[in-house]
Amino acid sequence: MSYKDIREFIKVLENKGLITHISAEVNPILEISEITDRMCKALGGGKALFFDKVKNSGFPIVTNLFGSYERMCLALEVNNLDDIAKRIVDLLNQAPPESIIEKLAFFPKLFEISKYFPKKVKKGPCQEVIEKDNPDLSKFPIIKCWPGDGQPTDEGRFITLPMVFTNDPETGRRNCGMYRIHIYDNVTTGMHWHIHKDGARHYDKYKALNKRMPAAIAVGGDPAVIYAASAPLPESVDEMLFAGFLRKESVELVKCITSDIEVPANSELVIEGYLNPGEMRLEGPFGDHTGFYSAADYYPVFHVTCITHRKDMIYPATIVGKPPMEDCYMAKATERIFLPLIQLDFPEIKDINLPIEGVFHNFAILSIKKSYPGHAKKIIHGLWGKGQMMFAKLIIVVDDDVDVHNLSYTSWRVLNNVDWKRDTVFAEGPLDDLDHSANWPRYGAKMGIDATRKSREEGMMRDWPDELFMSEKIKKLVDSRWKEYGF
Ligand SMILES: Cc1cc2nc3c(=O)[nH]c(=O)nc-3n(C[C@H](O)[C@H](O)[C@H](O)COP(=O)(O)O)c2cc1C
Ligand SMILES: [Mn+2]
């Protein structure tokens, strides 16, 4: 049985002793952030935290829900994140077309065969309380994460685990993305969708039509829905269909009170509103995933028309900052789930590691079955052309006998195998909005390293040496005499 909402997930965490209740009163301004950060840095991601009593608020806050491998697996109801990849491979095998090319064309439709289309319902717990006349964001326990957030203009409160729903004005297609929400005042917020993201594409279209854009921000829901908002799906894949596939049950959606946008009926809180085409305002600064503040920049403005919530709303939040943080485990889920989808384009890829220090996209290590000269470089360039992999600042490709999750072994192989001039490639292109290293925002250099064994055709004039391995005969001998040596 899939979780209906965040409450059922919290109950499971409680039964397993994976969540701690804090009954002392805590301040949503910075205090919760510091407590959560310490918990995230505890061995293996510590526990989830439930703050029963939040200063100046009648609602509790929950943080670090997904912040360990165990909790991330529980959230998606699997023993192992690779189990989801296996289900995707099964789906691909059910796909009617035979050839890889046809399968590629099939990707946008892939999750449709799972038949977990979102279901429309008339009523949902997220609308137990409707505040239409005087919606007021100050009633909710929205946190401030880092001292410089929002400085110097405002208090720096941000909704950090939101699901932003918009519709494409041309196709009607839905999008749901996790974009942080900067609170400006009781009825106004920022809308921090980077220009590369699907929400921004929808906004561009409304702008071209010079039409007001309806949008809704949902907070809290079943964990698969929350995770799906962060998943780097192609624009044509509905995150709610994908969430239905993950939870093996359709997501129930309810129509907003003041617009046609549909939101998960089992959310905790929904903020309805609109964006005016072209209206921009300084958003940020915000202590970000990178471990640095992302600088204030101009983003669209969101106006609140209505707030609906559960009577006893539970407010989930995440703290991002220097890794390891909760979102690193969401990134690890993405790494596992998207491997079979990357393999659709590149079947020669055996495995991928996005080390958490790279914060989702800065660093990707791939192992490949190399078949021809320049193969690794082709993979590097190919990945830079694929969805959000375009943000990868460093891609390292190794041979398929390297376990890319063993960073010590991988580093040793890379450092020995690489001639830096021959084996590095540089490219210029789009960078993630949060990157602060390049001379300009959103544009700069990326590096690829081919750390595979080199052949003559690749310019290597010498024979590649063999790696050291002891003979099986001697290993067996030492095994059998181990006790005799006195160990
Ligand atoms: C906790 C968290 C916060 C995020 N904040 C933002 C953000 O403020 N802006 C943004 O563009 N992407 C943000 N992302 C990344 C997007 O959610 C991600 O790129 C997603 O694929 C976007 O959805 P889309 O592909 O439908 O645009 C965040 C991710 C996480 C896990
Ligand atoms: Mn999307």
Image (cartoon, rainbow, N blue to C red):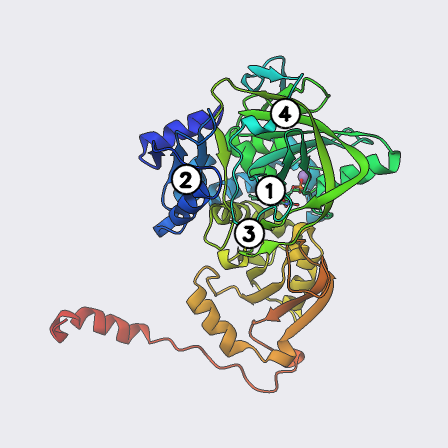
Confirm if mark 1 falls within 8 A of ligand 1. yes
Query: Which residue occupies the extreme right position in the image?
Result: 209
Q: Which mark is residue 169?
A: none
Which of marks 3 and 4 precedes in the sequence?
4
CB at disc 3 and ligand 1 closer than 8 Å: yes
Q: Which mark lies nearer to you, 3 or 1?
A: 3
Q: Amino acid at mark 1?
A: Ala
Is residue 360 or residue 94 the one in the foreground? 360
Q: Which residue bears the numbered disc 3?
A: 289
Q: Position of residue 364 (x, y in %)?
A: 57, 60
Q: Quadrant of residue 440?
A: bottom right
Q: Earlier in the sequence, mark 1 or mark 4?
A: 1
For the point 59% across and 35% down, the residue is 162
Q: Nearer the viewer, mark 4 or mark 3?
A: 3
Q: Amino acid at mark 4?
A: Val
Q: How many residues crowd mark 4 within 10 Å: few (<14), some (14–19), many (20+)?
A: many
Kindly state the secondary structure of the residue where label 1 is placed: loop
User: Which residue position holds label 1?
Assistant: 231
Please, what is the three-letter code of the amino acid marked with disc 2? Arg
Q: CA distance from mark 1 to mark 4?
A: 17 Å
Say above or below: 45 vs 279. Answer: below
Residue under label 2, please give it: 71
Locate residue 140, reporting x and y percent: 54, 28
Image quadrant where residue 443 sits: bottom right
Percent of width and height locating residue 108 = 70, 38
